Image: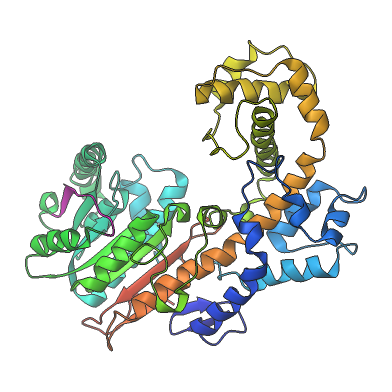
Amino acid sequence: MAADSGIELPDGFSSASEYVAEVKRIYSPYAFLAQMHIVDFLVRPHWESLDAEWRSYFMSDEFDLSKLIPMATHGQMDEACPASLREFVGKMFSLQFPRQRMGGQAIGEERELVLRYFVDGMSEKKREEVVDLAALVGNVARDTGSGLVVDVGAGQGYLSRVVAYGGEDAPRVLAVDFAEGQKRGAEVHQRRTLKRLQGKRAIAEGFKGPRDMEARLVHRVLRVDLESTRELATAAQEEAGGDRWMLCGLHACGDLSSSVLKTFAESDAAAVVVVPCCYNHITEGDGAGFPMSSELHGVEFGINALKTACQATVRWESREQDTMAGFQRNYFRALLHYLMVTAGQLPMDAPFPAVGGVTDTELVAAEEHVGAVGDDRAFAVYAYAALRRLGVEWRPTEAQCVEARRRTSHGYRQMAVVWTLRSLMGPLIEGMLVVDRALYLRKHCGPAGGVRAFALFDAVTSPRNVVLVAWRGGRGGSNGLKD
C-alpha cells in the first residue's frame, strides 16, 4: 500500500495524480459495463457487448455460477479463464482504493464507554462506526483546538452524543439535520442519555463527562446542499461564538458529503472529517458534487456507474446465499420488463418504472392470487407483487410467465455474469470519487494543514468505510490520527 501525503493508494503509485491518470485510462474501455442498465437486459443486446471469448467461457457447461463469488471477492479464476478476462479482473483488483482497515481510532476505554452508556437504539454495525469515528473526531478537535464540532446529517444523533459527552475535554456539538422528525427523535435520545450519564450507576462507576452537559449538544434543523454552504458556515460560526470549529459527518449521503467538504473549503473551519455514502445520489457537472478537483475535470460516470460504485463484492463470499438471491432478483426484474414490453404494456424506449425492493410481506400477500407451480411460481408471485406496487392493473397469465421463462432461460446466467463484471468496477469508481475529493481538499488546507483518506471501518461490516480528513493546522500541528 502506498501513500501520497496521507492519501492511501494501491501499491505501485507514488502520487494521487498518477493513480487518477491510470484509473481513467483503464476505466475508459470498460465504461460500457458500469453504465449498462440491468433492467432492460433481456430486451437489449447487452450480452453481445462482451468479448466473444468471455461469452463462450461463461456459457460453457464447465462454468458454474458459484465461481463468480470467489472471482468477485478475491479475483480468483480457474485455469480455463481467458487471458483477457484474467487481465481485466486483475486490473480491477490492482487499482482498487485500499479498503483494508488501518486500525480503529478508539482505545479500549473509549470503546467500553460507548458500549456502556451510548448504545441505546444503535445496531451492532452503527456501534462500531460511531465508536471509531467519534474517537477520530475527538482527536482532530483536540489537535486543531476546535471547541465546536458541527455534525452534518446527524439523524438520531448517535455520533453527536458520543462526541459531546465522551470525555471531560469533549467539544461542544451542533447537530444539524434537515428533518424535524430526526431532530425530535435525537432530542429524546439525548434526554435518555443524559439521565443515564447523570445517574447513580455512572457516578458509582466514575464516569467523568464534560461540565454543563445539558448545554453541550444543540440540535438544529437546517437543509444542507451545495447551494447552502454559506448558511451552514454562518450557523456554525454563530454557535462557536469565536471558538475554532470543525465539521464531521457519518455516511453523509451523496451530495451531502460534497456540501460538507465545500463548506470546509469556503469557510474558516479548522477541520473536516467525513465518511461519504450513497454515491448514486451524487450530481455531476460543473458546480455539482462531482468532480470537485481539476484532476477529474471532464470525467462523467452517469447514474448507473455511480450505482455500481455502491456495490460491495467484499461481502459476497460471507453472504453467499444473499448474493445468489440478488442474482435472482435482478433476473426477475428484467424478466418483468421483458414481459411488459413484449405484451405491449410498456413501449421499448419508455422510462423504466421504479419497482424498488419488493418486500417479503408483499410477496406473501401476492401468493394467494397466483396459481403457477414449479420454478415459474416464484416469478409469477414476484410479478404480481411488483405490478401491484407500481399500480399497474395488468397481470400476466400463467402461460405468459412460463413462456417468458422458457424464452429467456439463458438470461439468468448471463445477467449474473454481467452483474458480477459491473460490480468488480465498483471499487475502481469509488477510488476515483475518493481521490477527487481528497485532491479538492488538499487545495484548501493551507501550508500548515493536510489531508488523509483511508479505510476506518471493517469493509465487510461497513462497505462504505473510507474516511476523508482535512485540517488547517492546530495547536500541536498534527492531524489527530493514531498510527
Q: Residue at x 61, y 20 (%)?
A: 384
Taking the image as drawn, is residue 111 in sight? Answer: no
Q: Give coordinates of residue 52: x percent, y percent.
A: 84, 59
Asked whether 242 or 305 is in front, the reply is: 305
Image quadrant holding the N terminus, namely: bottom right
What residue is rendered at 75% in x and 21% in y?
Answer: 400
Q: Position of residue 177 (x, y in %)?
A: 25, 48
Is 25 rendered above or below residue 109?
below
The one nearer the camera, 76 or 51, is 51
Where does the image place residue 188, in percent across and percent down from the top left? 22, 37
Between 332 and 143, the one nearer to me in the picture:
332
At a point 51% along the width and 53% down the height, the residue shown is 303
Check the image and name the residue furthest to the right. Answer: 61
Choose top left, top right, bottom left or bottom right for residue 71. Answer: bottom right
Query: From which residue to which does the magenta span run?
Result: 216-226
Query: In this image, 13 relative to 408: left or right?
Result: left
For image coordinates 58% across by 67% down, the residue present is: 428
* In the foreground, 68 or 27: 27
Q: Is residue 84 visible?
A: yes
Asked whether, in this view, residue 209 is left or right of residue 130, the answer is left
Residue 367 drawn above or below residue 430: above
> How many labels sit on residues?
0
Magenta residue check for 222? yes
Left or right: 305 in relation to 80 = left
Query: Could you say which quadrant of the image residue 285 lies in?
Result: bottom left
Can you give x and y, in whole percent of width and height, for residue 281 in the image? 42, 52
Q: Does the magenta run of residues contain 349? A: no
